[in-house]
DNA sequence: ATGATTTTGTATATTTTTATACATAAGTAA
DNA sequence: TTACTTATGTATAAAAATATACAAAATCAT
């Protein structure tokens, strides 16, 4: 066992980022797997692994795997290597969390706010809230790995900006990443909340389905896709806008967007609530609709079933276009269970050709609160532990314990530039 | 200038695959770009580049780029490094070509065949046809880099098999790659023809649009997508099946698939031809429809405009779901020009929210024959010149001139395994 | 209890890569 | 014509990686 020295050899540390990334992403969790995946020699793998262990970034688990001879030791990231900060920005609430890299919640807080405060003031409040979470944290939680923000609006992921007018008034084309990087000096990621919910369901529950469709049915209706293992976002981050696809009918209802016959105007929580009010019931939103369904109110059930068939109609089109292997239905209205799901299945299996549906599963998302928050944590961790992110991270760790980058030999500088 | 020696140092050659891939893909075409992109030192880049030049795989172009000091020499793949074989398998024709890596056609042939001959006999005929093309080739065309096959059916790209019953009767779930690899011993790639047309348009005409939708309107109707620079295929290769999305109406026509109201039954070439026959005109397919449009027959123009609006309706849904930055319309009916395009634009701009359309372009594909064939060539070249493909290729080249893999030091063996 | 298998540890010679330095080539601007 | 800039060539010492070998640990089967 090599001597443990927290500072370690910093050049050796930054040089070990490829090994760190393989372990951190779960791509290789044993020495033999590292040998196979890295293409390096056994001695070099051992040397770099020892540097990571010495720096307390990686640890040997108690667990071993049988191999027919000496058992294989499992390797893993030290859970105390660091933490991430995430914020789910709603229309009236800010839900903040300090998370470990699994990601699991270490601490969290919820703040009320008003969207009219504007992005600059809101981002400052989020930064303050993050600092409170950090200062209240007990024990050694390692370094801040990165920050993630979830927004209920289309987000151009590469530019880190909201695109287009949306319910987040005043946020269109505003730089969100810059101010947050300014506050904390770590990588910052921003995405649309439905995309992050989709990422959560994929990574936590449906990992084997590399092409899956997530449909969020709540007060509004939206969709997220995993295509070949990655979030599909479209050219400007506005993919999945299925709520405003229109179907013609004589009684096409007016949508909030100003068009007639949108899926949302027929089947979203607000639309079902509208129809329930027309029948004399008290209902404002998706949650109220589900409360009435839970009370077995026949009219609420009837309207939910009808909504299921409308959602099924648009889902059928999406399935024809995208060819997913799995459809996951989540959001508040999904708590209606089979009242909603049966209509979705009926229309999808009716409308699509067998080629698209013969190996298609349509399921409800497992009930879980705050999945956008967990999805945001997952996004940050995935990026920070990627090969490029790991290189950047280990340079950051090394540079807090070593000489400045300007003094480094050329190779270390070049590695920094490539990671940048 | 290093001495030219065709056999070269084979270990040095396989070690240079990363440099070769960077040059071959166009990611780096100068020494300074190679330095930046490879992360290697200047001496190592030069050593590996010299090995590639000595092996006649890479050449220094006559062209230089001004730099303010000594001009930068442009590097490129030797056009005679090798060739690819491609086949476009139609319903009644086999269109074969021998292509250079640009890809451009060196030689080609067209064979009539019947789909009832079955896949085994057809693949044998294709192999024979490929051998004829090779034996007729003049001059040094280098080694066979790879083979590509295009099919008018959904293809599971990873498995290299047709999925589901289709117009290619008898091909469902048949191994296509195995027999062709058996014949020629090189990598073989199989994909759906619309995907390959999409790849061609993207790489040859719309390279800056990393999220684009290609709509093929001919006798049938289908779509292909480029998502973040890559072909989007779906879970089983059946994405883009927009022809069988149904819209309800009182007079919904019966489709060939057995459903009522499919987009294809309303707007495909065969459907317009059906409607023209009902009006007393002679028309069997998309080509006949366009011939009548070219003759300015009002009824043909009217039906084509109507088809444009139906296609526009489904395109609007696709645009809402996928958020492309560009829509390209191709296929035989696209020769109808603005008679078709104006209806597509009308419905897309009418039905979609501004968020999806404000930066969306909708254009006709430039006229060009055989774009699936060129797309197939592009697919082969992209794969063969990728980092993994280049490693495999250089191992193949080295092994035809060097000692057997079993005799190699451990590192060369490990590189082979990783490339495999 | 013993032998075989597989993993992991450690050492050393060789090879490859990098860092550094000096030099020349080929433009461009003054 | 000269000086400056940038690219490219070449050489050498130092560092890193690899190949190879020997050894010990920890199971498992007999």
Image (cartoon, coloured by chain):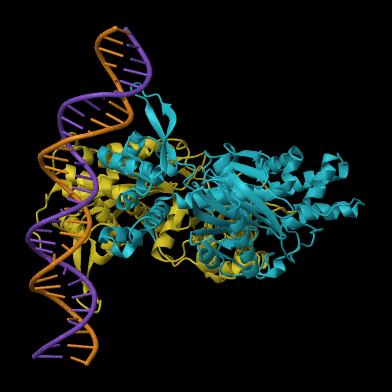
Chain colours: A yellow, B cyan, C purple, D orange
| Quarter of the figure with residue B60 | top left
Q: Is residue B391 visible?
A: yes
Relative image position of residue C10 (x, y in whole percent) = 8, 63
Residue A100 drawn at (x, y percent): 27, 57
Residue B91, by quadrant, is bottom right
Q: Position of residue B402 (x, y in %)?
A: 34, 56
B408 horizontally vs B282: left or right: left
Tell me if residue A408 comes above or below residue B372 in the rendering.
above
Residue in view at x 27 percent, y 37 percent:
B42
Q: Is residue B197 visible?
A: no
Q: Is residue B28 left or right of residue A413?
A: right
Query: In the image, what residue occupies the spot 30% across and 54% down?
Result: A108
In the foreground, A154 or B146: B146
Q: Residue at x 29, y 63 (%)?
A: B407
Is residue B225 or residue B416 the one in the foreground? Answer: B416
Q: Is residue D23 left or right of residue A128?
A: left
Q: Locate the N terminus of chain A by quadrant.
A: bottom left
**Residue B23 x %, y %:** 41, 41
Q: Residue at x 60, y 57 (%)?
A: B130
């Amino acid at each position: 066992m090599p001597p443990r020295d927290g500072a370690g050899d910093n050049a050796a540390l930054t040089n070990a980022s490829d090994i760190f990334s393989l372990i951190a992403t779960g791509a290789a969790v044993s020495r033999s797997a590292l040998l196979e995946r890295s293409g390096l020699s056994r001695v070099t793998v051992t040397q770099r692994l020892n540097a990571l262990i010495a720096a307390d970034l990686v640890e040997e688990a108690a667990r071993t795997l049988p191999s027919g001879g000496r058992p294989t030791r499992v390797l893993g990231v030290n859970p105390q290597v660091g933490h991430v900060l995430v914020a789910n920005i709603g229309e009236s609430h800010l839900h903040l969390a300090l998370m470990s890299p699994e990601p699991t919640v270490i601490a969290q807080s919820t703040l009320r706010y008003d969207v009219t405060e504007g992005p600059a003031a809101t981002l400052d409040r989020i930064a303050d809230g993050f600092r409170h979470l950090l200062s209240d944290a007990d024990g050694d939680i390692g370094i801040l790995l990165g920050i993630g923000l979830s927004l209920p609006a289309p987000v151009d992921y590469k530019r880190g900006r909201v695109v287009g007018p949306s319910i987040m008034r005043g946020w269109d084309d505003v730089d969100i990443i810059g101010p947050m990087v300014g506050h904390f000096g770590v990588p910052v990621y921003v995405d649309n909340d439905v995309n992050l919910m989709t990422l959560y369901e994929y990574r936590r529950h449906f990992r084997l389905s590399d092409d899956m469709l997530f449909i969020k049915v709540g007060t509004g209706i939206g969709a997220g896709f995993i295509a070949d293992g990655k979030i599909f976002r479209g050219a400007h981050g506005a993919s999945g806008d299925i709520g405003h696809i229109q179907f013609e009918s004589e009684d096409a209802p007016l949508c909030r967007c100003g068009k007639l016959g949108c899926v949302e105007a027929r089947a979203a929580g607000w639309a079902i609530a509208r129809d329930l009010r027309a029948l004399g019931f008290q209902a404002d939103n998706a949650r109220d609709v589900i409360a009435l369904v839970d009370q077995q109110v026949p009219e609420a059930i009837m309207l939910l079933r009808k909504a299921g068939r409308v959602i099924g109609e648009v889902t059928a089109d999406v399935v024809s276009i995208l060819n997913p292997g799995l459809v996951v239905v989540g959001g508040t209205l999904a708590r209606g269970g089979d009242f909603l799901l049966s209509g979705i299945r009926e229309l999808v299996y009716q409308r699509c050709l067998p080629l698209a549906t013969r190996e298609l599963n349509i399921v409800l998302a497992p009930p879980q609160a705050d999945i956008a928050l967990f999805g945001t944590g997952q996004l940050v961790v995935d990026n920070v532990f990627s090969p490029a992110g790991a290189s950047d991270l280990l340079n950051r760790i090394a540079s807090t314990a070593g000489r400045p980058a300007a003094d480094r030999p050329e190779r270390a500088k070049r590695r920094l530039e490539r990671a940048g």
